[in-house]
Amino acid sequence: MKSCKLNNCLWAILFQLILLVSAPPVSSQNFDFSKLEPQVSAYTVIVEVQIEVSFGINSSDQEERYLGTIVSDDGLVVFDGTDLASDNLFSSFSGVTVKTTPTKVGVTTLDGLHYDGEFLGYDRFTKVGFLKIISPQEKHFSPIKFNKHHQFRVGEWLALYMIMPDFVSPPLAADIGMVSSLIESPEPFPLTVGFNAMQLTAVLYNSAYEPVGMLGNMMDPASSSADMGGMLESMESSGIPLLGVITGDRIEQLIATPPTKGEIERGWLGISLQALTKDIAEFWGLPLSGGIIVNEIIRNSPAAAGGLKIGDIIYQVNGEPIAVDREEKVAVFQRMIAALGPSAQVELGVMRSSDGAQDSVTLLVTLQKAPISPSDAPDYEDLSLELTVRELVFADYMVNNLDSEDFKGVVVSELTPGGPASIAGLSLGDVIQRVGSTEIRSVAEAQKALEKVSSAHPKEVIFFIWRQNQTMFVNVKPNWN
Amino acid sequence: MTLLGISVFGQNSSTTNQKQIYNARDKVMPAVVHIQPVIKNYTTGELEKQAVVGSGIVFHPEGYVVTNYHVAGKAERIICTLYDKEIVSAEFIGGDPPTDIAVIKLNLDEHKGPLVMAEFGNSDSVQVGQYVLAMGSPFALSRSVSAGVISTRDRYFSPDVRLPSGERTGSYNLWIQTDAAINPGNSGGPLVDLTGKVVGINSRATLFANNLGFAIPINVVREVTQAILTEGKVTRSWLGIHCQALVELEGYFGTERNNGVLVSSIDPGSPADQGFLKAGDIILKVNGQAVSARFVEELPAFYYMISKFAPGTKISLEVLRGAETFNFSMATKSLGELQGDDFEAKGWGFTVKGITRQMRLENQLEDTIGVIVSGVKRVGFAEDGGLTRGDVITAINSNELADLAEFIGIYNQMTSAEQEKVLLTVRRGKGIRYMVITADKSKGVSLNEELQTE
């Protein structure tokens, strides 16, 4: 009998729950997409990009279609730049540089006008891509205006348009999702549910039909390849995409300083770093609830010039506390430094230990431009030997534990299978240090030496290379016919 | 199809050959040993025991058996089955990773019958096309014989090949290639000529290929086993040079045929480095004796020649640099161990290795200070702290460590004091990192016996 009662009780509760869930009409059902149409058709465009993807011994062309949004009256367009953000994380490990080059950019408005576009670059953190419409007569576009002050709530519905394949008409389809959590740490952003990764960079609308942000993958590796510590950490972190809102004010910031060539220029300090976790702070008896441990100072970097020392703990940047107490939050610090931009003057609050006592020091550091990644390094393609070499960059020195003062050369970044360089045994990632008896210290020197080879038509070219900690000679026999 | 094998040796000479095969079989098979070692593996972050199977051959009346280092090198116990099916335990005597040779000793007290030993032949006189038999335990099928010919006697393998235990192997010898079927489990077994003499120790095979097996020439084995029996190990000299065949580069260096050995790379801090040798130098003479390596097949003999000097010997090198000839003189050093000893820090969830000079060079470390992490347990305390394989631990709770012995000392002290949290200072690439790991108190103090010299 008891169990019977309990059953009745459960039924009552369940019944009520069902009522609660289904009774009030949810706002998604009421979302009237037709109200969005006039504004959406004014600033929404279809972006078609031909991309050349080259990775070492192979290159291929692909055509991609994105939903774009006009963000300025002179025709600046944002779109999902993930495909164009070259993978610069693994290239230094494997020697293989993945390089994506947009070869042709086209923009079509929803009313069918075609324009050529110029790819400007992308933001490495949000992966938002930027392009500029090239219009013959200084045409004025009507850009999107984000509501920068929208307060996101858990449970609130968000709407977006996604792009359909090109054989489907009309090109746009609607979708509805919801704010599922207001994430606080490692950094604040509204998390969404109901959307998917195919919809990245779509404009999100609130129930008042205002654009409030764009869909973003909030957990992409945020660290810069310049800071090895963070780089490894982000590789270790889980790859689960967390789709969230890139808020209106963040987008406005990006639009204010769009990239000019490739990536948005970012500030760089020049340290290896790790989080001051609670455990480590306890071990060292530090009265801090987080910070950045300086593990390595890069030679000639802003950190070196500013007087930072190995073992210092950065706990303040421009007076703001740095509460980095987990490795996952290191990226937030890196992003902050990056966003300050090159040549920014930064005041660092630093805790320094000497003889068991701690001193607090304030250092003034002038940031520099972050070192370029392997895929952005200048390169030279030699058509007769069928190889491409690129400049040695900072990440190469870090990954291979090499001294940038002593170690010079150029990296073999592309090889044609069956080409003279490839069949002679050169491999991707080899560092060419000499061509014949000419020392090679840069791509310019490599180009000069290889051009000389091309005009002299020798039977063989002897390369002196570095490969995995050892040097060797490689005899390349060009095919001059 | 199944009858193919019958006509392998041709019809005319089949009777003679058949007799010779029986004869060789009777001489050597009774000395073939089926070896089942339990080997220790530290690469997963904890000590794992693995039962493996290999082959061996009795070569000494006191019960010494030669096999491969990759069979018995890391064995903590060895069980052998002799040809008479008697089971006898054995102990590891010594090993030589550079040649992949190990010697074990049968516990003859446990053996009731007579012990048969095989006779070593002369691997320098074998010929391509010569009939040979391979004996051993392919896929653990003991007492198996396969037949074939010597396919080539000077097969070269790049010294980049590594043993499962991590050591680079094969720099000092060429290999006898045979089409006698050699499968996993044949390792350590004899390659026998038709007079019943062992001409090689079967060690490698190309997987998924048809009958590409490789044996270590018995003349190499003879020398290595003798050194192990008399001194416990093979001692080699080290100069720190890597060489390259000259054949494609004679035009560039302007050298004559069969004249000199090209130095392609110099290990930093090595005797060659300190003796001012450079990549691109061509060694013409060693102690007045002309040397040459026009082809890769000639490189092992040169490395062997250098290795044979007693460590510390001052040698003179006549070197061609550019158009000029110079004389260099330098003292060799001992090559030393390739890999350090292993240790399981059980309570901390990872394994470490001592750092040898060769490991320093291979891992681009600045020195041999500290211990190198050889494995981290998945879902362990150390993994949570971010420790990964290849990290070099240089201090524990800010106490600096010189070597593995100090690591073990501190580990034992801290685990017996039941210290819960441990701060590791770790060198990774160019930077250092600090990691706090939480010890598992249920895992007691590891015993010093984990540290073995192998």
Image (tube, helix red, strand yellow):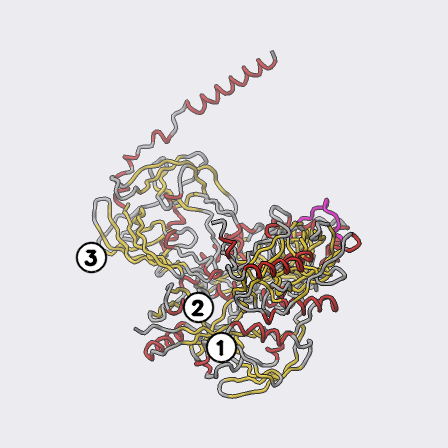
* Labels 2 and 1 share a subunit: no
Residue B228 rendering spot, x and y as whole percentages: 71, 66
Please report whichever mark, 3 or 2, sits nearer to the chain's N-terminal start. 3
Residue B352 rendering spot, x and y as whole percentages: 66, 57
In the picture, the quarter occupied by the C terminus of chain B is bottom right
Q: Which mark is residue A426?
A: 2
Chain letter of mark 2 equals A
Regarding residue A295, the answer to whether it shows in the image is no
Chain letter of mark 1 equals B
User: Which span of residues is magenta-colored?
Assistant: B436-447
Furthest toward the right, the residue is B109
Circle 3/circle 1 CB separation < 8 Å: no
| Other-residue count near label 1 (Cα within 10 Å), few / some / many at <14 / 14–19 / ≥20 | many
Q: Amino acid at mark 1?
A: Leu
Circle 3/circle 2 CB separation < 8 Å: no
Closest to the observer, B70 or A219: B70
Residue B205 rendering spot, x and y as whole percentages: 55, 58
Instruction: Identify the residue position indicated by label 1 in the image.
Output: B246
Q: Amino acid at mark 3?
A: Pro
A397 to A17, vertically: above or below: below
Instruction: Identify the residue position indicated by label 3 in the image.
Output: A136
Q: Nearer the viewer, mark 3 or mark 1?
A: 1
Q: Secondary structure at mark 1?
A: loop
Q: Which of the 4 image quarters holds residue B451?
A: bottom right
Q: Secondary structure at mark 3?
A: loop
Q: Nearer the viewer, mark 2 or mark 1?
A: 1
